[in-house]
Image: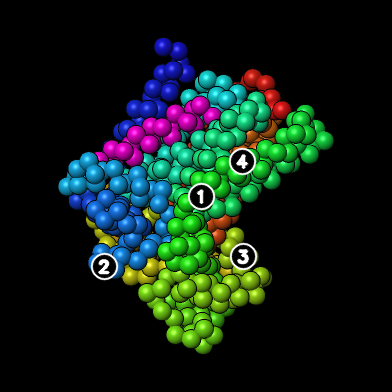
Amino acid sequence: MKPAGRLLAAAFVLTILTRLAFILLPGTPLDTKAVAAVGDSREYVALARNLATSHTFSRDTAPPLRPELFRTPGYPLLLTLPFIVHRPSFIVLGLFLQLLLSLLTVWLAWRLALELELGHGTSAFAALLVGLSPNLAFLSSKLISEPLFTPLLLICVLLLNRYRLSGRAVDLVGAGVCSGLLILTRPIATYFPLLMAAYLVYRVLSPRSVAHRSSLMAPALFLACTSVVLAPWIIRNGRKAGRYIISTASEHNIYLYDAATVVASQRGITIPQARDVMKSEAEKEFGPIDTTDEATMWQKLSAVARRHFFARPALAAPVWLFGVAASFLNPISVGPLLIHSGASPAAGSANLLQSSLALLVKGRVTHAFKTAWKVRVGGAPTFILVVLAGATLFNLVLIWFGLGSLFLRRTRGLYWLFLPILYFTFVTGTVGDARFRAPIEPLLCLFAAAALLRPPRSAPRTT
């Protein structure tokens, strides 16, 4: 076997070992690690259970089962399979399914690097970095959407890259379908197809492009395929809740996090108090808010929240940028890691990121970091400190060599990958965390591998 082949085999072996390490260590119950560690996991499990037993997409545990509008159906549908196969062991089956998805992610990263002409050795090394990633390994031990979303994004990028090189409509159709599945897995991808469509237009209109002008139909075809995938879900929401929307996720986030952080920073109050302020304003404007009607509740709360957020751009901008930076700088999701290890989160852990952002924009940097360290790491078990140290080292390597790759002629053919990287970084805003870096981490591994090994071959061609 050639060295590159051995390196790729090692990537697959390490992928399995790192995932099993988090699944088996430490000796806390498996349901604590896989479900209790991340609040979203409980919601996904409830949705999957209702899909399997009641054929209804709802989180409610007792009738009437209200239609779910926040979560999209992609990941719960996948999680339904373990329920159907063997309900008592659905966690084990779900984690096994995610282990397979992790192996697929490693293979896709290798394949994408090859098709970007990084060379066999660099491509295999990029796959090795993906397999070694503590963040990706940790998230694979949780029943959350990232283990599915990450390979879906890689498939979409891979197909878009093939279209860049070949101009084949079948690759564009596949990418459009895949982008629709991305949105149905996580609503954070809602505007990603528009960004990719704009890029396709740019390629055709660029003076240096050799693409045929008839390729201007490509963005329309791409968006049409995405829309076909989304249409049944949007129609379902319109019929059941009266709103033809993909999700209320953006309304949740701007009220619970973005605007709440701005209000808390401006008035010197806590995040829960800021939410109460906005809720009182919404009740004065719209009357009593029916919390059982999520479709209208979030619409009203977000209307007030948007005014607070966009009315103070000088404050909102640094809050947002600090949150974006957190996506890159957090080596691993420490709060879930605490629960994963059997430790109880310290007092003040709720909304810690938003509280820290409110301190940072006021220039209280030392206070923000001291508070974060005390709440998250102070008195943590040895297991957490070891994992945190390893994740920090890996993240520093990823950032340092990722930035270093920008100065290499060899990586110029990869620059278009900054579109998904920047999109999925900036759109997280004030909810930024290592977890939300997961979808773009394989792309970052490509840049880091190129800087570490400096492959000598010529840059990839474009059409």
Q: Amino acid at mark 3?
A: Pro
Give the mark, 1 or 2, whose residue is nearer the N terminus: 2
Q: Which residue is mark 4?
A: 222
Q: Which residue is mark 3?
A: 318
Looking at the rendering, the stretch of residues picked out in magenta corresponds to 93-112
Q: Which residue is mark 2?
A: 63
Q: Is residue 99 magenta?
A: yes
Give the mark, 4 or 2, whose residue is nearer the N terminus: 2
Mark 2 → mark 3, Cα distance in angstroms: 44 Å
Give 335 or 63, whichever is nearer the viewer. Answer: 63
Q: Is residue 399 visible?
A: no
Q: Which residue is mark 1?
A: 230
Helix, strand or loop at label 3? It is: helix
Q: Residues within 10 Å of mark 3 (few under 14, many from 20)?
A: some
> Is residue 196 found left or right of 24 in the rendered image?
right
Q: Which residue is situated farthest in the left direction here? A: 88
Mark 4 → mark 3, Cα distance in angstroms: 34 Å
